[in-house]
Image (cartoon, helix red, strand yellow):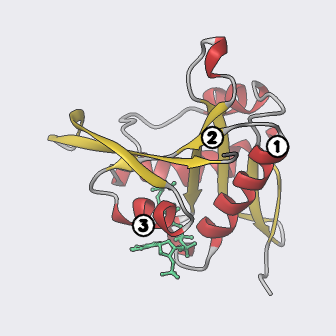
Amino acid sequence: MPDYVIRLATVADAEPIRAIYNYYVAHSTCTYQIEPETAEERVAWLRDRAPRHPVTVAVEGSTILAWASLSPWKSRCGYAEAAEASVYVHHEHQRRGLGRALLLDLIERGRAAGLHTIIGGASSDQTASLALQLALGFRVCGEMKEVGMKFGRRLDVTYTQFMLRE
Ligand SMILES: CC(C)(COP(=O)(O)OP(=O)(O)OC[C@H]1O[C@@H](n2cnc3c(N)ncnc32)[C@H](O)[C@@H]1OP(=O)(O)O)[C@@H](O)C(=O)NCCC(=O)NCCS
């Protein structure tokens, strides 16, 4: 049995969510953000969620180990039934099954909320992220060459997709 629970995040979770994310801003191409996110930005992001776009956290005791979210894919109304998934596991807690559990939970939340499809993807050098998505049934739908730049390198992005309904 896992020793953590997955629950919806609240604004009170903003700091641990931000800390997990900012580690990857500084050290990884899994986000193309360059400057650390501020506390105000993360609080505003948490306050701005709609029912179809949850943020979840995996919590052990009172410690947040990982978080995940569904966000609008694009702002035009016609895209309302598509959402983009994000999962960030604290760098000291990888390979405990947290990423898998959070992404599976997001899929079920998205289905229950009436979404039609979830879009994934990652910088093409992010093998862990892409392996997780493919292991859960996401399919690669394309790769865009050199659309990103971080740490002095141009980066390709691979997009994936999971259909919630046929
Ligand atoms: C990608 C990430 C979310 C994976 O989370 P995790 O909790 O470490 O992964 P899990 O233990 O749940 O692994 C689930 C599956 O993902 C794949 N996987 C995870 N990490 C991997 C790695 N380093 N290399 C290859 N495959 C990996 C495997 O298929 C794994 O199944 P297995 O353990 O049976 O082999 C985590 O590494 C992370 O937060 N990375 C930085 C942020 C990021 O890239 N987020 C985007 C994800 S959508």
Crowdedness near tag 3: few (<14), some (14–19) or many (≥20) residues, C-alpha within 10 Å: few
Reading the image, the residue beneath label 1 is 12
Q: Identify the secondary structure beneath mark 2.
A: strand
Which residue is drawn at the image coordinates 36% and 38% (left, top)?
A: 32
On screen, residue 74 versus residue 123, left or right, reads right
Q: Which residue is mark 2?
A: 117
Asked if 1 appears above or below 117 in the picture, the reply is: below
Q: What is the three-letter code of the residue carrying label 3?
A: Ala
Which amino acid type corresponds to the residue marked 1 in the rendered image? Ala
Does dot 3 land on a helix, a strand or a loop? helix
Q: Secondary structure at mark 1?
A: helix
Q: Which image quarter: residue 67?
A: bottom right
Give the labeled residue for mark 3: 131
Question: In the figure, is residue 113 to the left or right of 121?
Answer: right
Q: Amino acid at mark 2?
A: Thr
The residue at label 2 has a CB less than 8 Å from ligand 1: no
Residue at screen point 46% across, 37% down: 36
Mark 2 → mark 1, Cα distance in angstroms: 29 Å
Q: Depth check: 21 or 163 in front?
A: 163
- Place of residue 108 in the rendered image (x, y in percent of width and height, measured from the top left): 77, 54
- Disc 3: residue Cβ within 8 A of ligand 1's nearest atom: yes
Q: Residues within 10 Å of mark 1 (few under 14, many from 20)?
A: few
Q: Which residue is more in the foreground, 18 or 113? A: 113
Mark toward the start of the polypeptide (3 vs 2): 2
Distance between the Cα atoms at labels 1 and 3? Answer: 31 Å
Kindly indicate whether the residue at mark 1 contacts the one at mark 2 (C-beta within 8 angstroms).
no
Whether residue 155 sits left or right of residue 25 in the image: it is left
Q: Are marks 3 and 2 in contact (CB under 8 Å)?
A: no
In which quarter of the view is residue 150 placed? top left
Image position, residue 133 (x, y; %)? 50, 60
The residue lying furthest to the top in this view is: 76
